Image (spheres, rainbow, N blue to C red):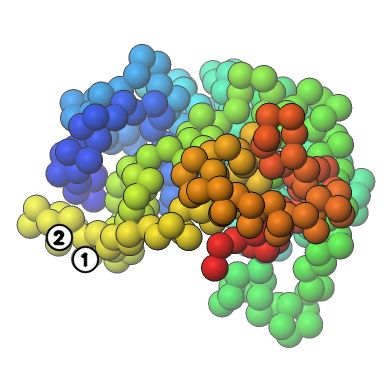
């Protein structure tokens, strides 16, 4: 698989001939299982075939149970300069319910070791868990603050089909997920992170100044990106593409020098809708001037007409720079608002 990833990077370098790579992200699956040598092999392939800025942000996603003190010290000696750690919760009952492999002690232990070697760390936390009290949720957040972490990504619990949690809820063995509880937890999240000096720069992301995720911010600002490996997605502002999700099919294609990719040409509606969806999720909002420039005055006027209801409900507003943004009241509802503003 590692050899195939290296070969795909070589096969696709033409897609980035006139672009400079600003961020590198080891994500999806469990990249923390890679050895340091394997990580370096992939980084070498990127540096040999692509133009890279000086000191790019290089992030590695990791599970707490993979991050031993030895692994962290190895990573600290590599080019990786940012860790994204899937803590999810500091309470065993939450982790067991979510079927996580690690426990609360491992979560605390890995963070204790990580902060000694890495300055740039982000953690994931889940809220909206049934039976989680407001106090319990505040304690989870306080753990992050106590460790001095400068970036937090936090998501509402969602129940995916064909999972153990979905089966338990269906059988009445576990309470249903409450949108009201999730909304209350979200409001606590916004208030508590603000007290600690975090900036709520995207619906699910909170960062201290200079600690925003450069990689994820690129997605939200509509920059091009190249995804390598099975199931990986890519985007170049005109097309969206994705690799086959089957490992065997991926390996066989790459070995033959073929790219197992499907490509979707983005329509005018697609591009407009993505701009609305991503923009409303961020502090930068949606530029009305950009809408007019890219799609015309009629589309801009239609957007303003459709937005009027949500402006009157104080869920979105237009600032002095002609940026359409969500209010505090509208943040939790951003995706729903965006879907009502889509071009169909």
Q: Residue 218 in the image: state x and y as whole percent.
A: 48, 35
Question: Position of 255 compared to 207: left or right?
Answer: left
**How many residues crowd mark 2 within 10 Å: few (<14), some (14–19), many (20+)?**
some
332 or 274: nearer the viewer: 274
Secondary element at image label 1:
helix
Relative placement, left or right, of 91 versus 100 is right
| Residue 129 shows in the view | yes
In the rendered structure, the answer to whether residue 154 lies left or right of residue 76 reads: right
Q: Determine the CA span between mark 2 and mark 1.
A: 6 Å
**Which of the labelled discs sits on residue 170, or is there none?**
none
Residue at the far top: name it. Answer: 54
Front residue (pair 247, 235): 235
| Residue at the spot 30% in from the left edge and 47% down from the top edge | 228
Find residue 282 and report its horizontal and vertical position in percent. Answer: 65, 39
| Crowding at mark 1 (Cα within 10 Å: few <14, some 14-19, many 20+) | some
* Residue 67 seen from this side: no
- The residue under the point 79% across, 73% down is 176
* Quarter location, residue 286: top right
Q: Nearer the viewer, residue 128 or 107?
A: 128
Q: Relative to 222, is 310 above or below?
A: below
Tell me which residue sits at (67%, 20%) in the image.
209
The residue carrying mark 2 is: 253
The residue pinned by badge 1 equals 249
**At 41% across and 29% down in the image, what residue appears?**
23
Asked if marks 2 and 1 touch (Cβ < 8 Å), the reply is: yes
């Amino acid at each position: 698989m590692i050899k195939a990833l290296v070969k795909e990077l070589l096969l696709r370098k033409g897609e980035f001939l006139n672009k400079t790579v600003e961020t590198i992200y080891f994500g999806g699956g469990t990249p923390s299982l890679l050895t340091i040598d394997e990580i370096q092999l992939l980084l070498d392939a990127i540096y040999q075939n692509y133009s890279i800025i000086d000191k790019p942000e290089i992030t590695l996603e990791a599970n707490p149970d993979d991050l031993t003190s030895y692994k962290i010290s190895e990573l600290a000696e590599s080019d990786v300069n940012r860790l994204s750690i899937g803590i999810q919760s500091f309470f065993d009952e939450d982790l067991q319910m979510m079927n996580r492999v690690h426990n609360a002690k491992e979560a605390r232990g890995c963070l204790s070791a990580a902060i000694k070697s890495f300055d740039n760390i982000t953690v994931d936390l889940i809220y909206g868990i049934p039976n989680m009290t407001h106090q319990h949720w505040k304690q989870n957040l306080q753990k992050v603050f106590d460790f001095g972490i400068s970036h937090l990504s936090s998501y509402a619990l969602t129940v995916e089909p064909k999972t153990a949690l979905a089966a338990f809820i269906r059988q009445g063995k576990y309470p249903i997920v409450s949108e009201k509880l999730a909304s209350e937890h979200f409001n606590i999240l916004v208030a508590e992170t603000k007290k600690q000096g975090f900036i709520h720069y995207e619906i699910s992301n909170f960062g201290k100044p200079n600690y925003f995720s450069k990689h994820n911010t690129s997605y939200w600002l509509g920059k091009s990106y190249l995804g390598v490996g099975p199931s990986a997605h890519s985007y170049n502002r005109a097309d969206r593409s994705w690799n086959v999700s089957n490992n065997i099919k991926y390996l066989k294609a790459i070995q033959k020098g073929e790219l197992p990719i499907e490509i979707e040409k983005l329509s005018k509606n697609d591009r407009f809708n993505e701009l609305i969806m991503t923009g409303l999720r961020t502090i930068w909002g949606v530029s009305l001037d950009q809408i007019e420039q890219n799609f015309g005055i009629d589309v801009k006027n239609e957007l303003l007409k459709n937005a009027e209801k949500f402006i009157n409900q104080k869920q979105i507003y237009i600032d002095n720079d002609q940026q359409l943004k969500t209010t505090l009241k509208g943040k939790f509802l951003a995706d729903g608002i965006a879907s009502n503003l889509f071009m169909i």
